[in-house]
């Protein structure tokens, strides 16, 4: 895939404009660059990855291609505690398939997104993994999980063929205006103690 393929996967999910987004598990920044291209000047992207070398390469490329987009890099494991600013959107592109227990992690991450903000997932459209993509989630499975997480308007935003695992899709969901609460539960199903 090239830059235009990455942009194409995100285009229907990411509205242009000055906004703050996070890209978790960003690597060298293929989708960070696509996000910067779509958001445009004045936007801010919080880029999180464990690999410092990948982040350095990403910073160099972002500085060359999108210097008007603020890049806030964090060398960290996105499954740990993150101090994220309030976000207009959160992108996980080819990173959620490394997480076995998605239902434990996602409520924490979704809590950083402002009401009516967006969660965008780019993932292989299969439910059986391999050593390189251990825990993928198909769009059908994601739509069900998004409903369980009380995300709204989950829809397919794009799809491209994959030479490895069938196809790669992008999906977008919206965070509700008022997080759902159930007895003994807080926002997005987190337990209140």
Image (tube, rainbow, N blue to C red):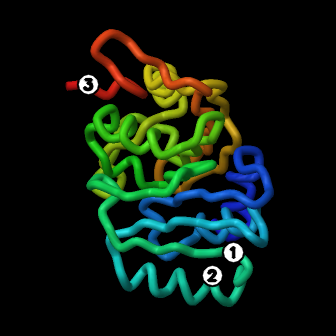
Q: Residues within 10 Å of mark 1 (few under 14, many from 20)?
A: many
For label 1, the SS is: loop
In the displayed structure image, the side of residue 104 where residue 68 appears, left or right: right
Q: Are marks 2 and 1 in contact (CB under 8 Å)?
A: yes
Disc 2 vs disc 3: which is toward the camera?
3
Query: Which residue shows up at 39% across the image and 39% down it?
Result: 106
| Label 2: how many Cα within 10 Å (few below 14, some 14–19, many 20+) | many
Q: Is residue 68 above or below residue 104?
A: below
Q: Residues within 10 Å of mark 3 (few under 14, many from 20)?
A: few
In the picture provided, is 57 more to the left or to the right than 130?
A: right
Q: Could you tell me residue 135's position as x and y percent?
A: 33, 43
Q: Nearer the viewer, residue 95 or 85?
A: 85
Pointer 3 residue:
192
**Residue corresponding to mark 1:** 69
> Which mark identifies residue 62?
2
Say the numbered circle drawn on residue 143. none
Q: CA distance from mark 1 to mark 3?
A: 37 Å
Does label 2 or label 3 sit earlier along the sequence?
2
Q: Position of residue 186 (x, y in %)?
A: 36, 24
Q: Residue at x 69, y 74 (%)?
A: 69
Distance Cα–Cα, label 2 vs label 1: 8 Å
Query: Does 108 sit above or below residue 53?
Result: above
* Separation of residues labelled 2 and 3 (CA atoms): 40 Å
Q: Is residue 157 left or right of residue 178?
A: right
Q: Which residue, as the protein is rendered here, is positioned at the far front?
A: 193
Q: Earlier in the sequence, mark 1 or mark 3?
A: 1
Residue at 32 percent across and 67 percent down: it is 76
Marks 2 and 3 close (CB-CB < 8 Å): no
Position of residue 101 measured from the top left corner of the image (x, y, whole percent): 27, 37
């Amino acid at each position: 895939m090239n830059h235009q393929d990455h942009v194409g996967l995100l285009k229907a999910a990411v509205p242009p404009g000055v906004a703050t987004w996070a890209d978790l598990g960003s690597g060298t920044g293929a989708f960070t660059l696509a996000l910067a291209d779509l958001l445009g000047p004045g936007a801010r992207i919080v880029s999180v990855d464990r690999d410092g070398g990948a982040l350095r390469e990403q910073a160099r490329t972002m500085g060359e291609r999108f210097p008007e987009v603020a890049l806030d890099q964090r060398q960290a494991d996105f499954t740990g505690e993150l101090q994220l600013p309030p976000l207009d959107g959160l992108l996980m592109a080819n990173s959620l398939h490394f997480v076995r227990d998605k239902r434990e992690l996602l409520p924490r991450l979704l809590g950083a997104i402002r009401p009516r903000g967006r969660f965008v997932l780019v993932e292989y459209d299969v439910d059986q993994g391999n050593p390189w993509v251990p825990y993928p989630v198909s769009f059908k499975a994601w739509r069900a999980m998004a409903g369980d997480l009380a995300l709204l308007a989950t829809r397919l935003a794009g799809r491209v063929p994959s030479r490895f695992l069938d196809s790669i899709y992008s999906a977008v969901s919206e965070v509700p205006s008022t997080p759902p609460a159930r007895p003994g539960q807080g926002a997005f199903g987190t337990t209140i103690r």
